[in-house]
Image: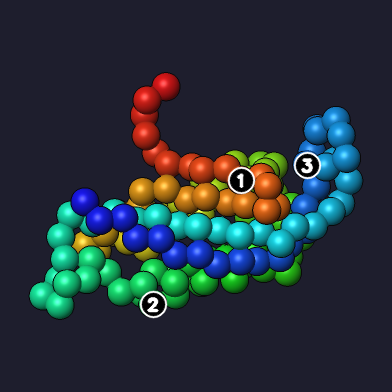
Amino acid sequence: MFYLNVIDTFSAAHLLKDYKGPCSKLHGHNWKVRVCVKAKEQDEIGMAMDFGFLKAILSNIISNLDHSYLNEVVPFTETNPTSENLAKYIYECMEKELIDKPVAISEVEVYESEKSSVIYNNDQIC
């Protein structure tokens, strides 16, 4: 199995509803997003998938989040724009874009700072 990672960043503001703490106030982050896809095979030139293709998909997804107030971006109008929910959202968007491609989404990691991140995958182990 091959695992390919691409990374991109975006800047956005948010606040956490019903949270008791400083994050309940409007604040921003320079988010870093790492997407990992997996592939069983390589093509005729030895690639599982072109990194440029994956980067373009991720860039398109996060362009809707960049320099926004996340609480006003669907689906975060209905759910808190936590790092967990951002990771799940990006995972699901990537998953849709990769249907019928030779790779499958493995996980998405979202960093809200250099010291804090969350990883989302769809493993059903709990």
Q: Which amino acid does label 3 sit on?
A: Leu
User: From the viewer's perspective, is the residue at label 1 or at label 3 nearer?
Assistant: 1
Q: How far apart are marks 1 and 3 (CA)?
A: 16 Å
Q: Looking at the rendered structure, which numbered label has been put on residue 48?
A: none
Q: Which residue lies furthest to the top in this view?
A: 126
3D distance between C-alphas at marks 2 and 1:
24 Å
Q: Residue at x 31, y 55 (%)?
A: 3
Among numbered discs 2 and 1, the one appearing first in the sequence: 2
Mark 2 burial class by Cα count in 10 Å: few <14, some 14-19, many 20+: few
Image position, residue 61 (x, y; %): 52, 66
Q: Which amino acid does label 1 sit on?
A: Ser
SS label for mark 1: strand
Above or below for 123 versus 89: above
In the rendered image, residue 95, in percent from the top left (x then y), is placed at 37, 54
Judge left or right: residue 122 versus residue 119.
left
- Graded by Cα atoms within 10 Å as few (under 14), some (14 to 19) or many (20 or more), the crowding at tag 1 reads some
Residue under numbered circle 3: 16
The three-letter amino acid code for the residue at tag 2 is Gly
Name the secondary structure under disc 2: helix
Could you tell me which residue is drawn at 59 percent across and 71 percent down? 63
In-image side of 124 versus 49 (left or right): right
The answer to whether 40 is drawn above or below residue 50 in the figure is above
Place of residue 1 in the rendered image (x, y in percent of width and height, measured from the top left): 21, 51
Q: What element carries label 3?
A: loop
- Identified at 37% across, 34% down, the residue is 123
- Left or right: 126, with 112 as reference point: left
- Of pointers 1 and 3, the one earlier in the residue sequence: 3
